[in-house]
Amino acid sequence: MNILRHAIAPAFALLAAAAPAAAEKISLNEISRYLNGLQTAVADFTQVNGDGSVSTGTVYIHRPNRVRFEYAGGNGTLVLASGGQVAVFDGKSNTGHQEYPLSRTPLSIILAPNVDLNRSGIVTGHSEQGNSTVVTAQDPSAPQNGNIQMVFTANPTQLRQWVVTDDTGSKTTVVLGDMQTGVSIPPSRFAIPNEVARRQ
């Protein structure tokens, strides 16, 4: 199983519950402002993989360019992004971890130091769906890397889920639980060399 695809290529579901009256579409300026202000966050997540399987865990975000997916189940599966790299630690594998450039994953768009969704070519879809605003974005210099579809609710603006379509067309959905923002997360939690050394 390609855990990078399933974790960093997080498809679409689960958010259609509890929709009151339809809200106005959130502007790209407001979404950019929100993402740039989202320095640290912690949330439980439910992940729906491209093959239909479901996993859960906790995600830690420390912008820019750092994220940590801790998967429940006790087998040590973990995905880290920092220093421009993504490291995948498959708890079921004995072959060690794999690393990829963060720039190859569409999630890098929302982890970037400065998110500007008004930049030419980055947004390919911006629509209102029920009580949510859905934005689809890609790296305009590397559209072959896939795209990320983000779902936001308003008042206040909050990221609720994302869908990443990877370079093979496979989709995975990550649905976020209640997000705690402004939390203190030690940078060491994202250090790939630390995790490699811990597992040796």
Image (cartoon, rainbow, N blue to C red):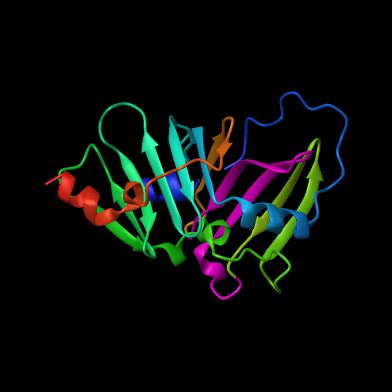
Horizontal arrangement in the rendering, residue 181 relative to residue 68 (left or right) = right
Position of 82 with respect to 95 (left or right) is right
Inspect this view and state whether residue 10 appears.
yes
Locate residue 42, reporting x and y percent: 50, 38
- Relative placement, left or right, of 178 versus 191 is right
Q: Position of residue 56 (x, y in %)?
A: 44, 30
- In the image, residue 117 sits, relative to residue 163, either above or below, namely below
Residue 1 in sight from this viewpoint = no
User: In the depicted view, which residue is nearer to us: 168 or 129?
Assistant: 129
Hey, which quadrant is residue 179 in on the image? Answer: top right
Q: Is residue 56 magenta?
A: no
Asked if 137 appears above or below 200 in the picture, the reply is below
Give the number of marks: 0
What residue is at 60 percent from the left and 50 percent from the top? 38
- Most foreground residue, 174 or 185: 185
Q: From the image, which quarter does the N terminus lie in?
A: top left
Q: Which residues are magenta?
A: 140-167
Residue 71 in the image: above or below residue 126: above
User: Which residue appears at 54% of the width and 40% of the height?
Assistant: 173
Tell me which residue sits at (63%, 57%) in the image: 36
In the displayed image of the protein, which residue is found farthest to the top? 18
Q: Nearer the viewer, residue 62 or 111?
A: 62
Question: Where residue 137 sits: x, y (%)?
Answer: 64, 60
Decide whether residue 164 is among the magenta residues: yes
- Residue placed at 72% from the left, 54% from the top? 31
Residue 15: quadrant of the picture: top right
x, y percentage for residue 145?
50, 65
